[in-house]
Image (cartoon, rainbow, N blue to C red):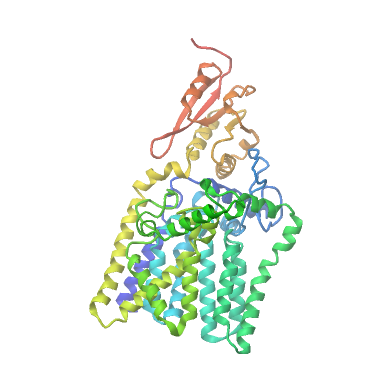
Amino acid sequence: MTSGRVAGLALCLLIALTYVYDLGRTPVYFGGDEAHFAVIGQRLAETGRNLKGDLLPLFIRLDDPQGPPEDLPWGTTWYQPMLFYAVAVVLKLLPLSIAAVRLPLAILGGVINPLLMYFVGARMFKRRDLAFLSAVILLLSPPLVILGRQALDYALPVTFILAWLWLLLAYTDTGRLRLAFFSGLVLGVGCYSYIPSWAMMPGYLGLSWLIMWNRRADGWRAIGWSAVGFFIPVVLVLPWLWAHPTAFHEIVQRYRVAEDGGTSVLSNRVNLKGLASLVSIYWDYFDPAYLFLTGGPSMTTSTGRVGVFLIPIAIWLPAGLYALVANRANWKWSVVLAAGLFAAPLPAVLRGIPDMVQRELMIFPFAVLICGHGLALAMRSRHAVARWCGAITVAVMVLQYGVFVHDYWTHYKRRSAFYYDPAAFSEIANVIFSVERARAIPAVYFGADIDDVGAKWRFFTTAEGREGLMDRTRYVADPWSVADAVPGSLLVVYDERLKVQALVDGGRWKVVEVVADFDQRTTAVVLTRLESFRRER
């Protein structure tokens, strides 16, 4: 192995470590959805059942019999199953912790996905250097780092897309029908990874058929085998829907309302003005400022100081699109890559969600491969300037990535703390556990408006081995008028100073601690019920 390859592998390993380093403390707080994946994954690991007692469920319901009562407009919330089972597998081997729950995505993002991208690039470009650069570009993508370090299922489809592309390329190279079958099977299984996959994976299957189609009998057989592979896992949903007749309606109802008051196609309110809004939202997903400078407004998916792609991609993405247009000999693959690129934002757009990179992570395999075609133009150029430009931009990407990760582990932790958890629930849990070590707590009352309070409380009590507190926990819609609390009970509310002061002035409650988050913003207050009523004047 040459020194250059050794250096390249060392660089990839160093970058991959950024996906797993300090997982338990960065991001600084455990989000609500992460807590749901954690507690249900833990129950699946222990019993094979979800919190409601369903054995090996195909889809996962989030409601918890011991959690706060939920009166949601759509009824029950259902999630895709794949990440829950991935977390359960890890928790069979490791104790429950934030780092363990985040580990499956970190391994996918830092190890499995770049390896798959390398294999895809090697098949597509027939050059190891371009395959290696494609893997590096994928590793260096900021949203994949940020979301690859959280127990969220947004990034799961990327793995299935890469596996599908490799199988499809292998089929075109060898003509083996079993590869066509497995390419469809991978897409079918991928439908269970993240909710928009139910719309996107059939589209990718159609692109597969474009590649496989020819006038000879083997093309039709390949199309048939890929369809069989796709429908084997997908057909499992039919008996499940029969057993859960309200689930489909509840899932659709949940997505009928657009986020942030936007226009959703499912809302049945789309008119000319609404269509114009959807076109505008779609256009925004290709705004250069969003793509290469800011990465969108969400502080849990972007630092706000780096784009969806690093700045040099602004050169190689257009260059790659030009290469696809010029590549008439292999036009089918050009259509596949371009369609994958421009279709990626559609699920978010159709729901009326602007500039949310987590909703379009399926763009990355296609964008990276298109960039690879752009880099191929430079590397094959007769002009030394073009070849030097390729080398310089790769170096710039690595340097910009270094700036990004430095910010991610320092200032970003403070800027983003509130957005990951406005209550700083881990700090609340520490206060309660500290009180419980000193004395028995008759009951713990939580304001039901605290963000994902049920899932987070179940996670921290389980991780600390204090599940008994769950039996003494109450969730109250109006925590400011709890009248029947036993003396010594705790009450946890958001830091609304006037209301807290009114409770204290009433003589029945005393502040135990005012909770502050990582950025020293006060978030919540823990109070204790006094032994006897007293009114101070």
Name the image quarter holding residue 419. Answer: top left
Which residue corresponds to the image point at 76% horizontal and 56% vertical from the top-left? 243
Left-right relation of 356 to 207: left
Q: Residue at x 33, y 62 (%)?
A: 311
Residue 221 in sight in this render: yes
Q: Is residue 394 left or right of residue 497?
A: left
At 58% across and 18% down in the image, what residue appears? 531
Image quarter (top left, top right, bottom left or bottom right) of the N terminus: bottom left
In the image, residue 309 sits, relative to residue 506, either above or below, namely below
410 to 82, vertically: above or below: above
Q: Residue furthest front?
A: 272
Specify the quadrant of the image occupied by residue 142.
Answer: bottom left
Q: Is residue 304 above or below residue 385?
A: above
Please indicate whether residue 382 sits to the left or right of residue 105 in the image.
left
Residue 31 x, y percent position in the rendering: 51, 46
Q: Image point 47% across, 59% down: which residue? A: 282
Residue 57 location (% of width, % of height): 69, 56
Q: In the figure, is residue 110 to the left or right of 223? A: left
Quarter of image, res 378: bottom left
